[in-house]
Amino acid sequence: MTPSTTPKAEAAPRSCKPAAALMAWIFPGMGHLYLGQRRRGWLIMFGILFLFMSGLLVGGLDAIDLKNDRLWFIAQAFNGPIAFVADFLNQALVQNRPEEERLHLIGLGHVNAIATLFIALGGLINLAVILDALYPINRSDHPNRRSNDA
């Protein structure tokens, strides 16, 4: 046989795992934990929650705002229900106050923009993670991979 006619090893078809994708959206990293990829799930969880919490610490609750920053919120929503809870708290605790009180609670200028970007970036990364959990690759054929993925 010539090298061009040598049959290639067929890759196993990807299977669809909607439960893992849903779990990955509900809480970042949980979809990969469900798939048995513990180390990867914990690293995903730490990375995305670090971006989310850093954004909240830098810009406060005002960094997540469905009413005023709808396009940014679309990206932030992929962080999961925690983004909706943060938006609810923002609307209830910050946005419903009188103007003079609200000025002390909202993030202004570049700080708020950076915080919004951190949270949106975490959401977009989690979108890629959700898609990876939806169609996981069979990783058992990797030569250096341990069978328990620890």
Image: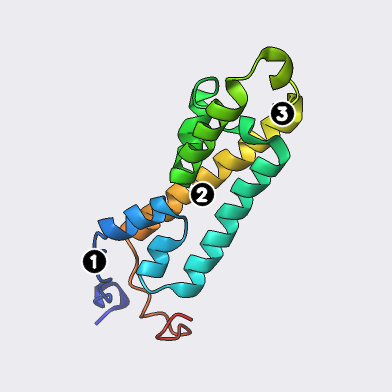
Q: Is residue 13 left or right of residue 75?
A: left
Labelled disc at residue 13: 1
Q: Position of residue 33 (x, y in %)?
A: 41, 69
Residue at screen point 34% across, 64% down: 136
Q: Position of residue 109 (x, y in %)?
A: 75, 24
Q: Is residue 100 left or right of residue 149?
A: right
Residue 32 position by quadrant:
bottom left
Q: Amino acid at mark 1?
A: Pro
State the SS at label 1.
Answer: loop
Q: CA distance from mark 1 to mark 2?
A: 24 Å
Classify mark 3: residues with Cα within 10 Å, few (<14), some (14-19) or many (20+).
some
Mark 3 or mark 1, earlier in chain: 1
State the SS at label 2.
Answer: helix
Residue at screen point 49% across, 32% down: 88
Q: Amino acid at mark 2?
A: Ile
Q: CA distance from mark 3 to mark 1?
A: 48 Å
For label 3, the residue is: 107
Mark 3 or mark 2, earlier in chain: 3
Residue at screen point 32% across, 60% down: 20
Q: Nearer the viewer, mark 1 or mark 2?
A: 2
